[in-house]
Image (cartoon, rainbow, N blue to C red):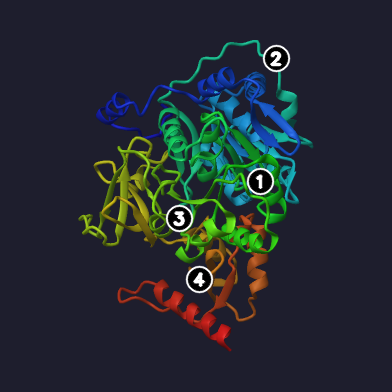
Amino acid sequence: MLSGCPTWPKEFAEQYQNEGCWRGETFGGMLRQRAAAYGERIAIASGERRISYADLDARVDRLVQGFHNLGIQAHDRVVVQLPNIPEFLEACFALFRLGALPVFALPLHRKSEITYISEFSEAVAYIIADVDSGFDYRDLALQVKANVPTLQHVIVAGEPGPFIALSDLYTEPVSQWQEPSSSEVAFLQLSGGTTGLPKLIPRTHDDYIYSLRLSAEICLLDENTVYLAVLPIAHNYPLSSPGVLGTMYAGGRVVLVRGASPDEVFPLISKEQVTITAVVPPIALIWLDAAVSRRPDLSHLQVLQVGGAKFSAEVARRVRSTLGCSLQQVFGMAEGLVNYTRLDDPEDIIVNTQGRPMSPYDEIRIVDEEDREVELGKVGHLLTRGPYTIRGYYKAEEHNVKSFTTDGFYRTGDLASLNSSGYLVVEGRDKDQINRGGDKVAAEELENHILAHPGVHDVAVVAIPDEFLGERTCAFIIPHESSLTVTEIKVFLRERGLAPYKIPDRVEFIDTFPKTRVGKVSKKTLREQISQKLSSLSNS
């Protein structure tokens, strides 16, 4: 096991093995088996490109050799920041097969996030696209490489510039590879944490493949499934719930697309005969509005999954009548627990809940501030443990003490209630985190960046309710001088290399902060103040 990764106690590991949760499967072995079973069936469609399971398996073997020739070894960490292109899956499966660990970065991450991720994980390589959505990742890589001593290689899907072309690494295999153990860590994901230091989430072959198998079963996937990957597949949700990996586990076809606009997606759903896709609530709302006027051919679409943020019941009721498909609500986290509404659930359950845990071995507790279980139906803090929920973050002993109970339950940070049928209704977060349309913004991280501006005395970041995104960010700033402007703040944050979704949507300058009775900044009062201000503006 990779040093610094907490794991399941022996008695739990034995239980999960004995109950058939963990079957000793690895990602490299999974692909090999699918290639043998499905051969020339298409695994990945991207634009005009078609890659069969057999071709994918062979390309992965060639890339394993190329990575090996660079000196990448088992347990090495490799930051992967790629959009929805086939190279994402080829690179990941090659690293899986080699026993090296992808560290999944998001396409919108910039210098601040990538430098930290690379340093903390001690990454030896960084895999990027050349240009995507107008952003040149090679320029970013130059900055990151200059600041991270362990980073030996930058590998580029596309025109390499001063770096290594990924396409040059596909080499005839001449070596035999020792498959990693299924109990070993397969990759590291990023947490959507509340502090300025995102945690790394270690997922093993055993636990993650178990989650794929369950997801594929619950979502009724098979070799005829066509999954459209709209969201960035480095996110846990489109990666595994059931996502691209769950679809491949079932032998289906993954269709990759880089945008979510109805102009691009609706014709693709028709052309590729897509049967299932997954979005966040803001995208679902755009699709629903567009479908009313355009009347697209979505006749093959059977399931629209919505997750990443709470989906309003009013909008949820429109899915079946407008798009002609079933709605499936998904609520999960990269740390483990995943909940689904089932496809045969009553409409009332599908519309009004966020589903129930997918495994019979998922344990759920809803507790009060003293960790006492609350009455059924009451809102409390959601705790969980199970065969695919981690027992601790990578190299984060101090944080793990706060995030996990002594008996191994993960404190999710979500406020939820549980009904008599075991379905969860998620009410919000108990942590200082803003869910901006599925992208998580840690208030403390953003505050620390703003405080670095010499013109800022103090700052507090809060959420503003938003009809479209669910929440937006508002930074209340006490300036040193009255001449400080909103534009200066936003330019400063962009120049610090902050991801675009973390730039505050609104900035309010203020003289003093309201305080709680114990002298802390009252973010509750700040939220009330900005809500009242925006309400009065909309009514004037």
Is the residue marked by circle 4 packed among few (<14), some (14-19), or many (20+) residues within 10 Å?
Answer: many
Residues under labels 1 and 3: Cα distance? Answer: 39 Å
Contact flag, marks 2 and 1 (Cβ < 8 Å): no
What residue is rendered at 73% in x and 42% in y?
A: 138
Image quarter where the C terminus lies is: bottom right
Percent x, y for residue 124?
Answer: 59, 31
What residue is rendered at 54% in x and 80% in y?
A: 534
Q: Identify whether 78 is placed above or below 440.
A: above
What residue is rendered at 73% in x and 50% in y?
A: 133
Q: Earlier in the sequence, mark 2 or mark 1?
A: 2
Is the residue marked by circle 2 packed among few (<14), some (14-19), or many (20+) residues within 10 Å?
Answer: some
Mark 3 lies on residue? 195
Mark 4 lies on residue? 464
Q: Earlier in the sequence, mark 1 or mark 3?
A: 3
Percent x, y for residue 21?
Answer: 35, 29
Q: Secondary structure at mark 1?
A: helix
Mark 3 or mark 2, whichever is nearer to me: 2
Residues under labels 3 and 4: Cα distance? Answer: 19 Å
Q: Which mark is residue 172?
A: 2
Residue nearest the observer in this picture, 207 or 328 = 328
Image quarter where the N terminus lies is: top left
Mark 3 or mark 4, whichever is nearer to me: 4
Give amino acid for label 3: Thr
Q: Secondary structure at mark 2?
A: loop
Residues under labels 3 and 2: Cα distance? Answer: 45 Å
Give amino acid for label 4: Ile
Q: Earlier in the sequence, mark 3 or mark 4?
A: 3
Mark 4 or mark 1, whichever is nearer to me: 1
